[in-house]
Image (tube, helix red, strand yellow):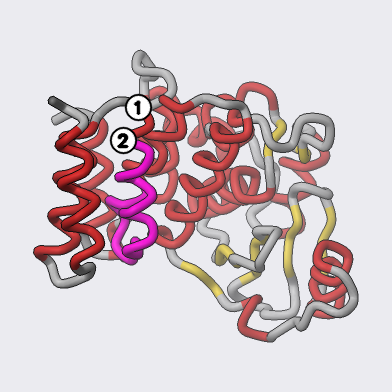
Amino acid sequence: MDITDRFAELVRGPEERCQLDLGALLIAAHARRDLDVDAELRRLDDLAAGCPGSDVEALTAYLCGTLGFRGDTEDYSNPRNSLLDVVLDRRKGIPISLSIVVLEVGRRLNIPLYGVGMPGHFLVRDAKDDNVFVDPFHRVRLDREGCEALFAKLHGSKARFEPRFLEPVGPRATMARMVTNLQRSFVGQGDRAGALWAQCLRVLVPGATVTDRRQLAAMLAANGRFDAAAQELDAIAEEGLGGVRDRIAATAMRAKLN
């Protein structure tokens, strides 16, 4: 089974069996085809083995203090900040990739934590105390008021904060957000091939929208894969998610093959 099939099987299986660390590393393996996923999982095991405590405070002090995991404030949008193996190498990343390190090392230590998909900045929440959050990017702990202040700083004081922004999100939603970030990073660098495989992974995750799939079709066409783009548009129409516009677009794609 190739890495794309492994990723699809993982994200389409039961949520409770969806391993976040494995999914993140399968994403990274699309950027580095010789990546030893099992060896990278063992690196997370080793990180957990070196932690001197088994609570949130000890974990964050160890990862963000002793080991120096931190946010990449100089080159935030670089795709490498979304690739877990590279984040482990550099000990730098963006909020979601750093949060995955915290979550997965914590899981190995039986520290109950949740991922929190706050718009603009992923966080980690203590499962035992819903007023304790970890922001590994800035290497700080926050309460709910601190999270709201961070949201206002990111989006402006007029942006409306909603309590649901601090609710837990599961592995599937986390991986969907991760590949979306990665796709945008590749687009920003003008890397069409990277953006394409990231978008291919995005549509494999349950919950992908028609817009996501139409974007995939557009990206396939931009990479000269007109027949694959047409097939995606036909599938959208056949599944009752699209309509005449998708059929017409599919015909136009196939015309480019002649």
| Residues at circles 2 and 1 in contact by the CB criterion of under 8 Å | yes
Residue at left offset 76%, top offset 56%? 135
**Kind of residue at badge 2:** Leu
- Crowding around mark 2 (Cα neighbors within 10 Å: few <14, some 14 to 19, many 20+) is many
Q: Which residue is mark 2?
A: 220
Q: CA distance from mark 2 to mark 1?
A: 5 Å
- Label of residue 170 in the image: none
Magenta stretch, main secondary structure class: helix
Helix, strand or loop at label 2? It is: helix
Residue 204 within the magenta-colored segment of the rendering: yes
Quarter of the figure that contains the N terminus = top left
Residue 79: give x, y in percent of width and height.
59, 31
Q: Is residue 87 above or below residue 58?
A: above
**Kind of residue at badge 1:** Asn
Residue 251: give x, y in percent of width and height.
15, 46
Residue at left offset 38%, top offset 26%? 29
Please give the range of residues in magenta: 202-220
Q: Is residue 238 above or below residue 197?
A: below
Q: Quadrant of residue 117?
A: bottom right
- Label of residue 223 in the image: 1
Q: Is residue 174 left or right of residue 216?
A: right
Q: Nearer the viewer, residue 198 or 143?
A: 198
Helix, strand or loop at label 1? It is: loop
How many numbered circles are shown? 2
Q: Is residue 133 left or right of residue 85?
A: right
Residue at left offset 46%, top offset 27%? 192
